[in-house]
Every structure is written in structure tokens, then in C-alpha cells.
Amino acid sequence: MHTDATALGLPWAIPFVGLLLTLALCPPIFPSFWISNYGKIILFWVLTTIAPLVACFGLDATLYQILNLLIGNYIPFIILISTLFAIAGGIHIDLNFRGAPNQNVILLACGAFLASIVGTTGASMLLIRPLIRANSSRAHKSHVIIFFIFVVANIGGGLSPLGDPPLFLGFLRGVHFWWPLLNLWLPFLVTLAIIFLIFYAYDCARYYNERENGSDCQPFKISISGKVNLLLLALLIATVMLAKILIPDSNNYIYFQDLKGSTVAISIILLGILLLSILSTPKYIYEDNQFEWAPMTEVAKVFAGIFVTIMPVLAMLRVGPQGAFAEVLSLLHTPDGQPNAAMYFWLSGGLSSFLDNAPTYLVFFNAAGGDSKLLMENESLTLVAMSAGAVFMGANSYIGNAPNLMIKAVAEHHGIKMPSFIGYLGCSVLVLMPTFYFLSWLFFAR
């Protein structure tokens, strides 16, 4: 039932690259066409992946791989972020300041640390609307959203397995729950300090000109409505933390797919939480938040396309030296066979900029031996490098991490003109690449 990934060559990556180029070029060049037809365009690239797989490996093998993707990854992923999206949409946080630079930094910092508690998706959906409202009077605010993506939707998830999917997968494979906090805190703080300094300097320059034209700063005050969703958020966190411990993984199969009892239980409970959130949230909160499912629908379709078209790419990465990416993976070790932490950082991060960072993390985790105890004790620097790369560099593009596109969609729904795919890449190159280069030199160059 398995495809032979050693037989796959680089042309199998064409649908994935084509989807990336489509996401990069169509929205800015043909916006109306994209809005009306993006589902069909994504379906085209999905079919260009599936059809060759069926022709070369047969219907059964292809169906097995797709179901494995849907059941093991996509469906739990979409249920989780949909539930977080609904809960966050049912919480109205009212901030009465006008987006002054120091207050924006405070909000970004709070979001960064919140992300490691409730996850990057939860923190992003909880704070993006208050941030937009706080900066509603600003003439220039797209940069605030961009830095929010950098900090809250990505880097902020670096201190716990709840923060970002790669760290959660590491936790499931034996990495201690507190290991990220104890080992990533210094790279985490250094990275945030640099980004905050850059943001503060740029935001001050923008804010000074706007204030000359009448903007005003008010004292910071906060009020929260929809507090029942805070309880549901706590229930969601407890479910994700405890289900793997309390619920045994029974062997249930659908078309040769092993359904883990804990995964099924988590998905069912989360769907229940989602329904409770919708039923218990007053209508006025949704209206105040301008809540719609359209951003979530777009993200679900885009990531369905990414998950399917990425299948051959990840398969080629998983077979390591026997696959088409053998030369790239050979860079992970020095000539004497020792792990090259800097390359683990850059390769895991580079691929996580465009691929789903959770399976990408697993590729490098396995490339380093896959023994969590050995990695934590003897190769801690390697584990730190791949963890930081996978989590932090998801900020490099709109598709590096799920919340990125959701934030973009919410911001545009509120009338903020966001940069195109390529424009955002330009921002990340200017801000993040020098930061990551310094991080690599400081912590991983040996």
C-alpha cells in the first residue's frame, strides 16, 4: 500500500511549486479572478499531484496515502484551528489606545508569551482583532500586522509543546514537556529583542508623522466580553495536554489507517467545544468582532492543497540519502560525521518557510537519529537548532505556518491592504534573515 519514494524525482515537486507560485502571483495580479476561483485553482494542482500518483503507483496506494494524510494530519489540524478560530471570534477584547509604538510592543510581547500557552493559532486569533481596532486610526498599519505574524503567529510558540505543532510532535516522541522552555528561552528572547527593536524604531517613525496630523495616545485600558470562551479555551488546552496520557491508543482501522484513540477523542471533544462556543456566544460579540467563517474557509482550502501537493516532496525527504534530496540532506553533517547544528537550523527553517513545519520537523528529527533521549542529553544543540528553525522560520512566508494566512485574511477583511506573497517575502528577508543569521552565528556556529 506504500509508494516507493526512492523512485520519485524532482519533477514530482512541480505541483507543489506551481501552487506556491499561484499563491504568490494570482492574488496581487488577478485579485477578482482569484477570489472567485481560488478553490478551482487549488483543485487543479491537487489533481496534477493525484493523477500521476494513480498512474504510477495505482489507485489503492494513492488512496492509502491521501487517507493517511487526511486522517492523520489534515482533519485533526483543521478541527484544532477551526475550534481556536471560533473561540477567539467569541472573545471581544476592547483596548482603548490608539496604537502608540510602546503600547503596540506591549501587545506583541503579551501575544508572544501567550502563544506558548494557547498556541500560535489561539493567540493570533485572540489578539488580531484587538490589534486591528487599536490601530484603526493609524494611516499606516500593515507593518503592525506583519510584525504580529512574525512574533505572535510564529516565534511566540517556541517555549512549549502547546505553542507550535513541531514541538508538540517532539513531545509525542519523547521530548520532555519542559525541554523547550529550558533550552529555547535564550534564543527565543534574543530573537524577540531584535525584532522588537526594529519594530519600535520603524513604528515610531510612522507614528510621529501621523501624530503630527492629529493622532493621539490614550491610557491603556482593557475590557473583555465573551468570557465563557475563556473557559472553553482552558478546556481545549486541557484536552490537548491530557488526552494522550489518559486515553489509550486502541487499534482501530479504516482502509488500513490506524486511528489512534487519543487523536479521535481529541477531535470529537474539540468539535463539541466548537459547537458550545457557537451556541454560547452572544450575537453582538460576533458583530463587534466582524466575525465570519470566510478566512477559515480560505485557509482550509489552501492548506488542503498544500497538504496534498506536498506529499511527494515530504516522501522524498523522508527517504534521506536514497531520495532526490540526498545532496541537501548530506549538508546536515560535517565531513567527520558530526551533526552540523547551523545547517539543521537553516535547512529545517528554510523548508518550514514553505512546507508544513510539523512533518518537516519530523524529517530532521529522524535525520538526527530519532532518539529523543540521546538528542536531549548528547545532541541538545542539534535539537535546539531544528526546533528553533522549524518554529521561528515559519514566519518567512504566508504559508510557513497556518495562522499566517488566517491573520492576512482577517486583516484584509477589515480593510487593511496587506503585501502580496512576494511583498511579504521581501519584508521577511529585510527583517528576519539578518536576525536569523545573527542567531545562527551566536548559538549554532561551531
Image: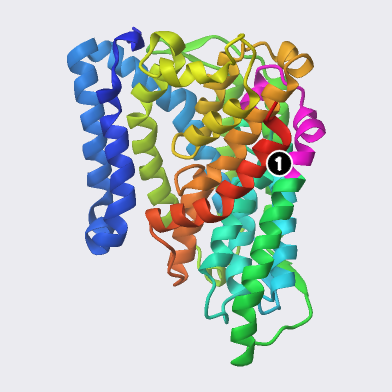
Residue 198 in the image, given as x and y percentages of width and height: 65, 61
- Residue, x 43% and y 69% (percent of image)? 417
Asked whether 216 or 36 is in front, the reply is: 216
Residue 337, relative to residue 309: is it above or below? Answer: above
Indicate how the structure is coloured in the image.
rainbow
11 part of magenta stretch: no
- Residue, x 72% and y 66% (percent of image)? 224
Main SS of residues in magenta:
helix
Q: Amino acid at mark 1?
A: Leu
Magenta segment boundaries in residue numbering: 167-188
- The extreme left residue here reads 55
Which quadrant holds the N terminus? top left
- Residue, x 41% and y 44% (percent of image)? 300
Residue 425 in the image, given as x and y percentages of width and height: 45, 52
Which quadrant holds the C terminus? top right
Mark 1 residue crowding within 10 angstroms, few (<14) / some (14–19) / many (20+): some
Asked whether 200 or 111 is in front, the reply is: 200
Disc 1 secondary structure class: helix
Residue 180 as seen in the image, left or right of residue 288: right
Which residue in the structure is indicated by mark 1? Answer: 235
- Residue, x 54% and y 42% (percent of image)? 394
Task: Please indicate, yes or no, whether residue 174 appears anywhere in the rendered image.
Answer: yes
Residue 132 in the image, given as x and y percentages of width and height: 57, 69
Asked whether 341 or 351 is in front, the reply is: 341
Q: How many marks?
A: 1
Residue 302, relative to residue 168: is it above or below? Answer: below
Task: Please indicate, yes or no, whether residue 228 appears anywhere in the rendered image.
Answer: no
Residue 130 in the image, given as x and y percentages of width and height: 63, 67
